[in-house]
Amino acid sequence: MTLDPITLTVIQAGLQQVCDEMDLAFSRAAFSPVIAEANDRSDGIYAAEDGALIAQGAGGLPVFVGTMQESTRILIGMIREGRARPPRPGDVYIVNDPYLGGTHLMDVRFARPFWRGGEIFCWLSNTGHWPDTGGAVPGGFSASATAVEQEGLRLPPVRLIKEGELDPEIYAIICSNIRVADQRIGDVKAQAAALEVGAERLAALLDRYGDDTVRAAIAELRLRAAAQMRAFIAEIPEGPHEGTAWVDSDGVVDEPLAIRLKVTRRGADLVFDFSGSSPPCQGPMNSVRATTLSSVYLAMRHIFPEVPMSAGAFEPLHVTGIEGSFLDARYPRPVSGCAAEVSQRIAEAVFAALVRALPERVTAAPAGTSGNFALGGHDPARGRDYVMYQISGGGYGGNADHDGLTNGCSTIGISKAPPVEIMEQQFPVLYRRYALREGSGGAGRHRGGFGLDYEVELRRGTARASFVMDHGRFGPQGVLGGRDGAPNEVTVWRNGTPYVPRHLSKEQDIPLAPGDRVRVRTPGGGGYGDPFTRDPALVAEDVRLGRYSADEARELFGVVLAGAPPQVDAAATARLRAAPTRAG
């Protein structure tokens, strides 16, 4: 079937709209602030034959692009092999097993077959971050877990909803293994309702254009996405192009983990070779295969945003060399940090490898941490337990055109920090500070954006705090002569005494009493280009706004501010040019 360009474009937009409406319905109906306010969720449409991505909501987390595709593919295979019950109309599967196309246990996936004429036309799937799935610590972010069982309840694909009815026995098993179980029904129903909205909207699209026409459009869009990605790949020199990124530690062994990457163009395809990366680690900073693949996909999506969301865009991208490393975790390796942290280090390695080949497209490293902070305890004023989950933004890297974004979302998604007012209303905490972390961006011709500086105090009851963050040992990389951004900093004040975690930004089960405080200063983005070529007027503006002092302006950028128009200090510039920089 030949489709005219207008019909093809309209159907493409229609499929996108189906996913966008699922995203919106999910967030509006969800109970937990991490979904309802932070939008830590995603919805998509996947092929009935192989689970290939057809469309995903524009407001969904990019890291779920590859993982939901892999998860759906595995589910389809398990059904064909008889390892999972075959579906009936109205069935919805639930799964959070990281080794079956997942991320960490808190990212719970629902999958629903969409039926037309008695056959499965496609699958609708979504992922939502549940604030708790059991395990050793509230929130699931165990910083020192050595096995996945310590991180929470692991679910294989099972039909939670059967022919439209919630299975009470499976739901009872789930509730018996998680904290604040009485509150989870709100998220479960919201997640299922989003798929119902998707089914209704997709049915309307098919009724309007016909099943055969939409099926032909999906196939054509996949082919065009692959062709478009290959056209962009042709811009890249053959290479190899090399980059390295570092994870601070695994939370158990206080040594950094290396992600070593070599990118080579072979014809119209790209090969991402991670050979030489660190072996599997004891702690929870292992990455499962699906997350590693998805991290490469989302990094290329950052570089070539023009390519539409489709499985075709991933076909020219080949990942090798992860076997036997911490980027291909196998059971029972713990993985709570894989999606939120390791995935961002993988993307950073891609950026570091390709920035010299594509200097107009690739940025310096962004903050690269989701700032996972979980607080669990009992609120005596309300007579109930709670699990609070806080994510936070950081600075983006500078680029060829302008400075990095300040307090942007993480590399892997579009999730935003929940509003302070919502958090204070829901939980017994008070935010003493919530501000930009001035001066945290790496110096450069275009400096990195600034991170966030917040401080939260426990008001009543007792609680336990846990962190799984990163970039506390190494700041985000500057590139092409730019300086690194400021590293992550975590300080816990207990009874007036400051405490810095041994692993800097990874710790669990820190007991808090009323009046105790946690302060987090998130990383700034890396700088892009020689900082001594920065426009002195831009430096002067940063000083006027209080982002740097006059002394810092001279030290970082070699610019003198003395009442007259800003000038470059030749002596300071010569001295600072000789200072070492990791980016070189």
Image (spheres, rainbow, N blue to C red):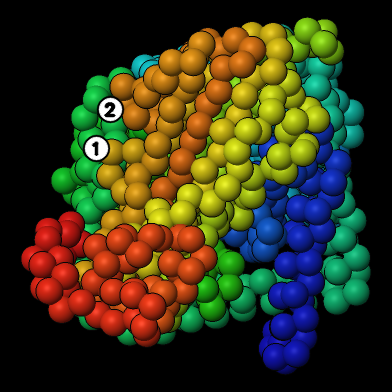
Q: Nearer the viewer, residue 112 or 584?
A: 584
Real-space CA distance between mark 1 and mark 2, rounded to the nearest whole angstrom? 8 Å
Q: Residue furthest front?
A: 563
Mark 1 vs mark 2: in front: 1
The amino acid type found where label 2 is placed reads Cys
Q: Quadrant of the C terminus?
A: bottom left
Looking at the image, residue 164 lies above or below residue 418: above
Q: Quadrant of the N terminus?
A: bottom right
> How many neighbours does mark 2 have within 10 angstroms: few (below 14), some (14-19), or many (20 or more)?
many
* Direction from residue 466 to residue 499 in the image, left or right: left
Q: Which residue is mark 1?
A: 257
* Direction from residue 548 to residue 320 in the image, left or right: left
Q: Residue 129 occupies which quadrant of the picture?
A: top right
Looking at the image, residue 442 lies above or below residue 569: above
- Label placed on residue 161: none
Q: Position of residue 132 (x, y in %)?
A: 64, 23
